[in-house]
Image (cartoon, rainbow, N blue to C red):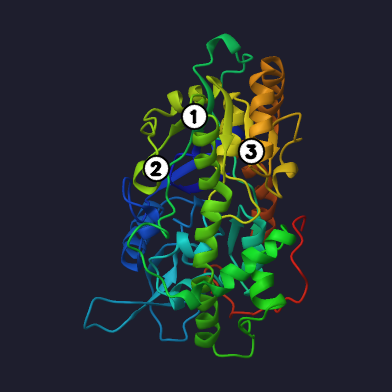
Amino acid sequence: MRIGVFGQQWWTPACAALGHEAVPLPMPLEPPADKHHADAAARLAAGERSVERLRDQRVDFLLDDAGSGLQFVSSGGGAGAAGGVEAPADSGAAPRRVALLHERLGVPLVSHFIDPMPTALQALPPMERWQALQSRSWIKLVFDKAHAYELRSFGVPNVLHMPIGAVDRAYDTRPIDPGQFTSAISFAGSQLGTYFYAGRQHEARSQLPGLVALAVRTARPDTVFFDVYHGLYGFAEGPRATEPVADRVAKIEHYYASKIFYNAALWIAQRDRFVLFLRRALPDAFRLVGRNWNEAYGLSSEPPIDSYDQFLDSHRRAMININLVSGNAETGVNMRTFEITAAGGFMLHQWRPELAECFEIGQECDAFRDEEELLAKCRYYLSNPQRVVEIAAAGQRRTLRQHLFSHRLAALLPLVTQMTASSGPRGAGAHPAQAVPTESRFVASR
């Protein structure tokens, strides 16, 4: 297969591992710019460059991370043109009609989101964002089952759950050597939850849905925000298929605005609290690597590791690698889950509903739910280095056998083939939005 790839870090090595050709395509914003800030103009400019790049070439489908392959091309036709999207123009000019790049090319687009959809596409106006998401030739792979559940419930087609993975590359598969540990307990990650920074002010009423959802989770930890907001407490009516598109989009945007406090609180509940605790409980044994910890909490930390090779090696030189998931995920695991284990390090993971779907807890990694269990397991493994070596080796074998990006690519190829075989005419447009009402409670195993 010939696969058009936006961004070369993950998917190009995966293509090579499976014997497929990766055709590099332009990003809307090139590093070091934040790809989440790519607006309509950047996506239109990149789309035109992509068309030129593919003018004399054929690709079977397009593949990206974080929706960078959602690009636009100039479109003729009026407001009702198939696949057309209203793109804001420069000030003083009328909006332009554009088409989605993949629909113009007549091939599927596959995007792997490792952040929530509203975050990844934040620079697009709401109407444009949700119009584009209705494309039925766009497969949206989401790493967090709870987020996939709410997107499907909002009528977004082709939303599938797919965990993140580890990059295809050569890894050191020798057993870790306890004699070469340079730190006892290590956590690598910057402090990025700014909602509670000093000087920030937020309307108290906007925090109510999040506070209620957090309270419900104290007794029912598997409950997700969507079921509290739309089901259990009914803070707002969900979008209906019979409503005008603008009304549906407004309801979806209000839902995500109401979720901001909840996500901010999850940053603390799932991540920051354990960093604060380890610095207090095991100050001499705990190594903290990352930015902003001093600004947020007065905690000293080491700067991020520049080299990816050194970053991977650091997991082999820490006896216990703590993994904490950000507030952007309710149920899923992060990329660090697979980086630590691929490198051959021992991972002690904050408990996640989806962790046991990827690893055998207690044999290929271990997990903790609260401060007491975290401290007990740290002390246990510090006293049992041989068990650390055994679990680390088993976790690495599992990741290299099952959790590389090439494994994710192999799993999605049949989906792309099926979509291509059943697709309509070349360049067919997106279908109208369909709001799917959901009455049942979220189940983490779905």
Depth check: 9 or 276 in front? 276
- CA gap between label 3 and label 1 equals 19 Å
- Residue 113 screen position, x and y as percent: 54, 54
- Mark 2–mark 3 contact, CB under 8 Å? no
SS for dot 2: helix
Q: Position of residue 199 (x, y in %)?
A: 32, 62
**Could you tell me which secondary element the residue under label 1 belongs to?**
loop
Q: Is 220 on the left-hand or right-hand side of 125?
A: right
- Residue closest to the far top: 179
Between 275 and 344, the one nearer to me in the picture: 275
Q: Residues within 10 Å of mark 2 (few under 14, many from 20)?
A: many
- Picture quarter containing residue 327? bottom right
> For the residue marked with disc 2, what is the amino acid?
Trp
Of marks 2 and 1, the one in the foreground = 1
Query: Which residue position holds label 3?
Result: 349
Do we see residue 158 in this rendering? no
The residue singled out by tag 2 in the image is: 293
Q: Which residue is mark 1?
A: 283
- Quarter of the figure with residue 99: bottom left
N-term-proximal mark, 2 vs 1: 1
Tell me the crowding category of disc 3: few under 14, some 14 to 19, or many 20 or more residues within 10 angstroms, Cα based: many
State which quarter of the image contains the N terminus: top right
